[in-house]
């Protein structure tokens, strides 16, 4: 499966870099897999893959399984990793990341990483693009 042109080797390397508990950093992960060059339509598709219950929001339990969207054998995020990831994307403090407005810009990887001066280049997520 391929995620809109993401390089499988980049995805594998990004996953390998965060196999140990508490080693996941979402900014570093996004940079390694190359999501910055994706269109907003591709990004929205990625958002909805992660939004497993199709509520229009990514809740903590869905975010905890973030890596498994890239590889079924990937580990779940630790509570600390999940909370840090959520805190960075939850702009209104409701405990969820929404698909619209300011919170969606968190998932608009290109804009997000340009603001952070980063470059961004997976398996079930890859198949959706």
Image: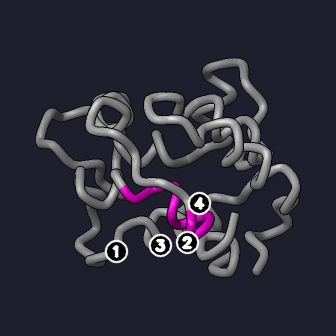
Residue at 34% from the left image edge and 74% from the top image edge: 52
Q: Are marks 2 and 3 in contact (CB under 8 Å)?
A: no
Query: Residue at label 2?
Result: 72
From the viewer's perspective, tell me whether residue 63 is left or right of residue 19.
Answer: left
Q: How many marks?
A: 4
Query: Magenta stretch?
Result: 65-73
Label 3, label 1: how far apart the Cα atoms are: 6 Å
Residue 126 position in % (x across, y down) = 69, 71
Q: Are marks 4 and 2 in contact (CB under 8 Å)?
A: no
Q: Is residue 102 placed above or below 1 in the rendered structure?
A: above
Label 4, label 1: how far apart the Cα atoms are: 15 Å
Mark 4 and mark 1 lie on one chain; the one further toward the N terminus is 4
Element type at mark 4: helix
Residue at 70% from the left image edge and 63% from the top image edge: 122
Q: Quadrant of residue 54?
A: bottom left
Using a 10 Å C-alpha cutoff, classify the residue at mark 2 as few (fewer than 14 neighbours), some (14 to 19) or many (20 or more): few
Query: Residue at label 1?
Result: 52
Mark 2 vs mark 1: in front: 2
The mark found on residue 49 in the picture is: 3
Mark 2 and mark 3 lie on one chain; the one further toward the N terminus is 3
Mark 4 vs mark 1: in front: 1
Mark 4 and mark 3 lie on one chain; the one further toward the N terminus is 4
Query: Residue at label 4?
Result: 43
Label 2, label 3: how far apart the Cα atoms are: 13 Å
């Amino acid at each position: 499966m391929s995620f809109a042109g993401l390089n499988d080797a980049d995805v594998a390397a990004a996953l390998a870099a965060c196999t140990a508990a508490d080693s996941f950093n979402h900014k570093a992960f996004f940079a390694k897999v190359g999501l910055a060059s994706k269109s907003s339509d591709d990004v929205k598709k990625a958002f909805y893959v992660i939004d497993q219950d199709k509520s229009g929001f990514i809740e903590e339990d869905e975010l905890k399984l973030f890596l498994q969207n890239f590889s079924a054998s990937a580990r779940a995020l630790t509570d600390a990793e999940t909370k840090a990831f959520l805190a960075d994307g939850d702009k209104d403090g409701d405990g969820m990341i929404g698909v619209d407005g300011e919170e969606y810009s968190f998932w608009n990887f290109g804009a997000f990483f340009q603001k952070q001066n980063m470059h961004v280049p997976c398996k079930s997520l890859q198949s959706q693009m």
